[in-house]
Structures are given as C-alpha cells and as structure tokens.
Image: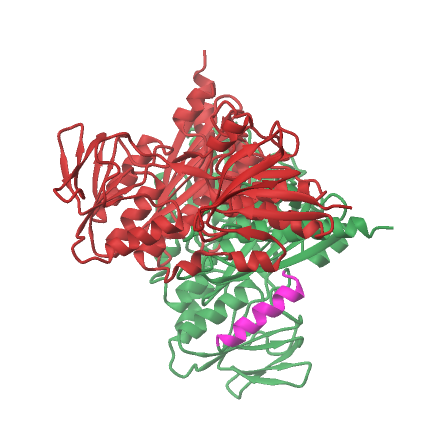
Chain colours: A green, B red
Amino acid sequence: MTPERLVVIGGDAAGMSAASQARKRRDADSLQVVAFERGHATSYSACGIPYWISGVVAGEKDLIARSPQQHRANGIDVRTRTEVVAIDLAARTVRARDLDRGREYDEPFDQLVYAAGSVPMRPAVPGIDAAGVHGVQTLDDGAALRAELEDDRVRRVVIVGGGYIGLEIAEACKVRGLDVAVVDRSPTPIGTIDPDIGAVIADAIRGLGIELVLGEAVIEIETGQDGRAVAVRTDADRRLPADTVVLGLGVRPDVALAAQAGIPLGTSGGIAVDAQMRTHVEGVWAAGDCVESVHRLSGQRVVVALGTHANKQGRVAGINIGGGYATFAGVIGTAVTKVCDLEAARTGLSEAEADSAGLRFVRATVDSTTRAGYFPGAQPIKIKMLAEKRTGRLLGGQIVGREGAAKRIDVLATAIWNEMSVDELLGLDLSYAPPFAPVWDPVLVAARKAFEAVEAEMGSAP
Amino acid sequence: MTPERLVVIGGDAAGMSAASQARKRRDADSLQVVAFERGHATSYSACGIPYWISGVVAGEKDLIARSPQQHRANGIDVRTRTEVVAIDLAARTVRARDLDRGREYDEPFDQLVYAAGSVPMRPAVPGIDAAGVHGVQTLDDGAALRAELEDDRVRRVVIVGGGYIGLEIAEACKVRGLDVAVVDRSPTPIGTIDPDIGAVIADAIRGLGIELVLGEAVIEIETGQDGRAVAVRTDADRRLPADTVVLGLGVRPDVALAAQAGIPLGTSGGIAVDAQMRTHVEGVWAAGDCVESVHRLSGQRVVVALGTHANKQGRVAGINIGGGYATFAGVIGTAVTKVCDLEAARTGLSEAEADSAGLRFVRATVDSTTRAGYFPGAQPIKIKMLAEKRTGRLLGGQIVGREGAAKRIDVLATAIWNEMSVDELLGLDLSYAPPFAPVWDPVLVAARKAFEAVEAEMGSAP
C-alpha cells in the first residue's frame, strides 16, 4: 500500500507540532511527512527574540526547541529555505520554491497542514521600508536587529507600537544601555488592557526611563541622505530622532496562499477551522497564528497569535491526522509580559471587548501584596476584575505589579474557563504561607470586592 | 428594644472575622459584640511565627493584623487575657476568667461564636514538659522560643515533627546559624505529600544542611540535672543532643469546652457545622481550626487548621449573624511551604487519601522549569498529578521546586475545585512569556502526561 503523504506549510510551532504528532502515531509505511519552511530554522521561540536582542539569552540556538536535523532524525522530511508559493486543491499539490537554488517544483499531498503563521503589521507611511527600520517577527529579523544594535553608532531606538512586543523590545534596548522611545496611537500601552490599568503600566514604564509617546500616530519615517531612517514623525508634529526604528505593531494572519487556493476564511480574517483544526476543505488542516479561534466568553471568532495556542493547535491537528482524537477548546485571551521588573497580565475580556460582546459588567480593582505584607520581598500587586451583572460570572482580569504578581493571572484564567462567578471564586482553596501570599490572597480580595460590586448593583437595579 | 448580644470565644482569625462582619452589618442598637481572648493579642498571623523567630520579620507587631485597640475602636468589646472556662447552653451564658485579676464572671449571650482554635499535639513521652521544650502555636509561644534562641548557649535545636511547621522552624533556626535536626516517625517529611515527592523534599532539606531523621519515633526527651531538655531519644536507639527542643507535630481542634457544653462534634473530632457555619445548637456558630469541613473531593469531613479557612469561615459566620447570607464551600487540602529556597505545595488528595476515599487513580510526574528553559533564572519544578481512572478527573497535585514553582498549585486547586479532567486541563489558556513559563507551562505538561496515563489505563482495562 502506498503511504499517504502529509505536507506541512510552515516549520514553526504549529506546523512542526502537527508533523511530530502525526509522525509519532503513524509509521513511514502509513504516512510520509514533508514540511516546508521559508527560513532556515524550525520550532523556534519567536517570543524569546526580545531576550536574545537584550543579550540575556546568549545565542540563537537557545531559542530553537528542535532543529531541522532533529526533526529529520524523527522521520520528518523538513525542507528549509523553501517557500510554498501556491496550493492547488484540485490537483492536490503545492508549488515549492527552493530559495537558495531558485528552482520550483510541485509536491503532491493527501493531507495538508496550513501553518503559515502571521505577517507583521506595517503602517503605510513614507520611509517604512528604509534601512534601519526593523521587524522582530522571525529569527532572521532578530539577527538583523541584533547585528545593527551592536554598532556603536546606534544610541537611540524608537519603537513603533506599545503592545507586548513593543514593550519587550523597549526593555531589551534599555538593557543594552540605549536611549529608548515608544510611540503608540492609543492613550495607554497594551491595547487589550483597560486604560485605567494601562495608565499604571504607562507610569511604571516611564519610571524605568523609557520615553513613552501615547495618543500619537506615526505619519512618517524620516530618512537621511543615505536613505537610512533618522527620525519618526507623528501626527502631533512631534519628531523623535532615531538611529534605529523597530516595528512592534503586532501581526495579522498570513492567509494569502490559503485564500488564493480557496480555503475559506472566517469572519475574523483568519482561516476557519473546526474543533479538530479541520478547514472547510477535505484533508486540509490549519493551525497557529493564521487560524481563528472561538473566544469562550464572547462566543466570537478571534485571531490570537501566541505560541501556546500554536503548539496546542498543531498538536490537535497532528493527533487527528495520526488517527487519534483531540480538539482545541478555544481561547480566553490570556497574556502576560514583563518589562524590567514590571509585570502585567490579562485574561478574559477587557471592558471594550465585553461591551462589544454585549456583556454588561461591574468592575473592582484592589491593591495588595504578593507575599504577606510583613514578609521581606512583598511586592505590590493590583488586580482588576470584571464580573457580569446579575450572574457575577467573572468576565475578565488584569494584573499589574512587581515580581510574583503576574502569574496569578492563571488562577483567573482557570476560573473564567470554568465560568465561575466571583462569589464562587471567593471560596477557592488557594495556597497560603507568608512567603507566597497574604492570608487573603490578592485574587480572593479582588473577588470579594467584585462580588460586593455585583451585590450593590443588584440592590440598585430598577 | 434591647440589642442582641453576640459572644465570641477566641480572638484570632476566625473569631475576629466573625465579630467584624457581624459588627459591620448591624449597629450597636441591634447587636452588642463581646470577644474573649486568652492571650494578649488578637487577629495575628500564627503562620508568620517561624519568620519572626528567624528574624526576617522584625517584630511581633508585624504579625498582628488588627490589635484589640483597633477592634475596640470598631465597636467590638474585646477582652484579652480572659479565658472562657465554661459554656451554659441552657442559661445562655459563658463563664469567663480574667487571667490577670483572677476573677470569674458570667457573660450572657443570644448568639455564640465558638472559635477556640486548636491545641498542639504533644507526645506522651517522658520529659515532654521539661524546660527547653517549646511549642510554636501562639505569639506567646513564639516570644518564648525567640528569647531562648537569643541565648548564646543554644547551639543545637531538635525539632520533633517534619510537617510544614516543623520544617519552617528548621529553616528559621538555620537562618539563625544554629545546628538543626528534625525527627519524624514517617519515612518522608510532610505526611500529606506522597512518599515519592516527599523523598525529593527530604533530599533537598538535607542539601540545606539540616539533619533529617526519618522513620523514627521520639520516645523520650532526656533532661539534665537542672531539669532542662538535653537530648531527644528515638525508638531506633538514637540520641539527638539538643539545647532546645521544638514541638512541631501539628494540632488538633480545641473542642473541650464545646464538648462539655453539649455542642455536637462531627466524625472527624471537629465541631460539626453546616454550610453557614451553624452548629447543631440554635444560635451557636463555630469557625476556624476547631471545626470540621467538607472535603470536596472525598466527601469526607476533615479538620484542616489553616488561617485561610479560619478567615473565610469567620467571615461567613459573621455575615450570617449580621443578617446576610454566605456559605463556606469546603476545602480541597491546598497547602504550601518554603524551606530556604525549596518550595513545596499540594492540593486535593494524596495517594493514601484517594485510596481511603475509595477513588482509583493513575499518576504522572514531570520535570520542567519555572521559566523558558533558555531564560536566566529558570528554576526546576516537579509536578505530580493524580487523575481518576476512567473519568480523568484531577484528584490531586503536588509540586516541589525552587523559586516560582509552588504558587502554581493554585491553578491545580482551581481546576480541582471545578472538577476538571486532566484532558480539559490540557486545553487551559494559561499565560505564557519566556520570563514566566516554557511555552508548554509545566502544569500543562503534567496534565498531558496524566491524560496519557488515563488513556493507557483504559486501553489496558479488562
């Protein structure tokens, strides 16, 4: 019997997780696995790039979980530096281009995993393609930026975008001893965090010596006579001198090939998939940054580009291709970041997201400490909760603080996942000892205050 | 109208939380609140005593959340150094003894909160009452031990009991530069942690330079000519020289007065209460270390002496007395401790507890890191999970590791609280960034392995 042929487009987390799981479950007589990757690395941590740039992570290879050689040793035919340029669903082939040799060829498939990832947002402003303007999405981007920052002439970096990646790059440049400015069109950093908590983050970031320009949109990257970027101009007539500009504006799903081939997209612009990560085309799967997921709270379809989801989704697709059964249960928007000693995290819905999902809520914010107040090393932690009116269901949580603060978001994420009300949350048997928490863990204090807000609102309801 | 009179027995977490909540909800015209406390402090952190002994917490007053004066300012008639010696349910009075003045008097009540706490276990061996043998349950105990350890002649401390408190006191003595030995009759420390994980903890504790004598029972505290303790003898013919002996054997509920008065106890030996913290006697409530709680997994009644429960139970009783409605939702046995840089935590059922509850399980243990493996400061973390056979329901979790490891137990506790299966757990949207976790959080890695164990066991089932 001829083995089935699985082709994987994209050699990072989602694609290689799918390939590995399928490979593990079916032997070479049953399944051949070919994976195409445009770059030269596979299965790497894009989230680790800022730490490689700062130098706290020593080498590129530290960021690579599994190299092409390792995948090949496991029986996966990995073809790096090879870009898939077209998919023919009728012929069941992909058109591959060997970037180094310049030749193109058709590769047949029975099953296809589309895991092309995402493409960085680039504002359509003059100068955006100038030398000295860097993205930070791939390892190759990271290498280029790192090389440039090693040039002593680079003293001042302007980062366009004040989201997670923008702030992490800001820290990296700060750690390298550079002057850093971050510019974002929103009034507070990290758009998925509410403005009141965002304002606390903004203050803390300025306290770290990072210049933060908020509420201003970039309208031009000014270039010098040599064509290199020399400044960033905003719509408030501000000119931010820059030796290097970094784009940290987030990403959008890379669906170009899929759309051309006729693989249906969803309402959010990501590839539409079911719980098993099947697209609407028989034998075609998709996973990672390019797909849309169900948000468990809003019920809406969303695209969340995050390594955790990519790994899980790839695993799910691979298990199913391998003959097993697994499903991806959706997302609730959990995220965390660290900028120097500032920690920030969020899960569930922000106020704006709850509004747009039609969910009404009350809010509560509390200040506490990460350890018992009297215990050395106790750090500040601020927790905000949104609870649905009437039901008290926890809809969202946001945390900002110092060491030991942010990872507590996982308790809120687990509570939201289980549709707990803040009243139920208040009963949780969370761990306590003075080095780890006050006797009322900050999470419980926040739940108590949110519960009181739910009760107060019911008392005052018409 | 004459106000109702609420009498509270016990001025620590449970009693004063009840008093405060009732006070907050009803004014002095409706409710008078009298609280009796045998010691001189109220609302203090007994869990903080080891850190006061070690010196990392500077003063006794740091451990006091709210003093008698503060409670009085809130309208609670706190009577310290006053012991309740009898309860007359028919006459609705308690008999109070003023310990400093030596006089006794009857105090009438309409509502009674019994929050007498616990009494430390003391083995019935010769020498147990000798000078130089210390308990560590109350602030007064702590003060006495602290004073003794400040004597330069004390070089070597033997701690009887290798549970949480015993190990925390061992650390405290180590921090003070003393020679420390811990003796426990069990084969591994912390009896509520499985022996396989306990063995890891034992190795780590020995690595800290603490002598750990396991599997041996204390049969005598040897005393010198002056009547002071000089050594601890075990049933293995071992003699551990000691300048000071500390008893850290845990506690049992202090139910003597309640039992004498006819307030019914439960099967576990703690006072029987319902969800509102009502005893079986009309108008009599109980809360804290002296009551029994429902274990949500086993369905059994258990006594868990822990500040978190005491605070919650006291709050619940006080809200109900105050005319509101609140319930205590039970416990699942979450606990955490830190010994130098070793962190250990547990939640749910241990293997022995699951066995005795009639629950069959599979187990999985994984080793991972607290941060991305390549990230500086990544520390080891070992997680063990028990999952119910067939259903895959998470029954228990145990964690041992270094900084950043133990507080992850709260995710498992929240999962257990919601009766999640390890398969469901695997889908959880937990936070990820390299400074906080590997892309597969250790909790998810453990859940994946536990799920594989559940599946394997089903495959092999007859």
Percent coordinates x, y for residue A210 in the rendering: 51, 76
From the viewer's perspective, tell me whether residue B372 is left or right of residue A460: left
Q: Quadrant of residue B118?
A: top left
Q: Residue furthest bottom?
A: A225
Percent coordinates x, y for residue A188 in the rendering: 64, 70
Percent coordinates x, y for residue A229 in the rendering: 53, 81
Q: Nearer the viewer, residue B5 or B368?
A: B5
Q: How many marks?
A: 0
Where B70 sits versus A7, above or below?
below
Q: Is residue B391 visible?
A: yes
Q: Nearer the viewer, residue B227 or A53?
A: B227
Q: Residue furthest top?
A: B462
Q: Quadrant of residue A29?
A: top left
- Does A200 appear in magenta? yes
Q: Magenta residues, as a range?
A: A193-208
Where A368 sits versus A299, above or below?
below
Q: Residue at x 13, y 29 (%)?
A: B237
- Does A317 appear in magenta? no
Q: Nearer the viewer, residue B393 or A229?
A: B393
Percent coordinates x, y for residue B88 in the rendering: 57, 32
Q: Is residue A430 visible?
A: no
Instruction: Tell me which secondary structure the magenta stretch mostly adopts.
Output: helix
Where B331 sits versus B308, above or below?
above
Q: Residue at x 51, y 76 (%)?
A: A207
Q: Nearer the viewer, residue A460 or A225?
A: A460
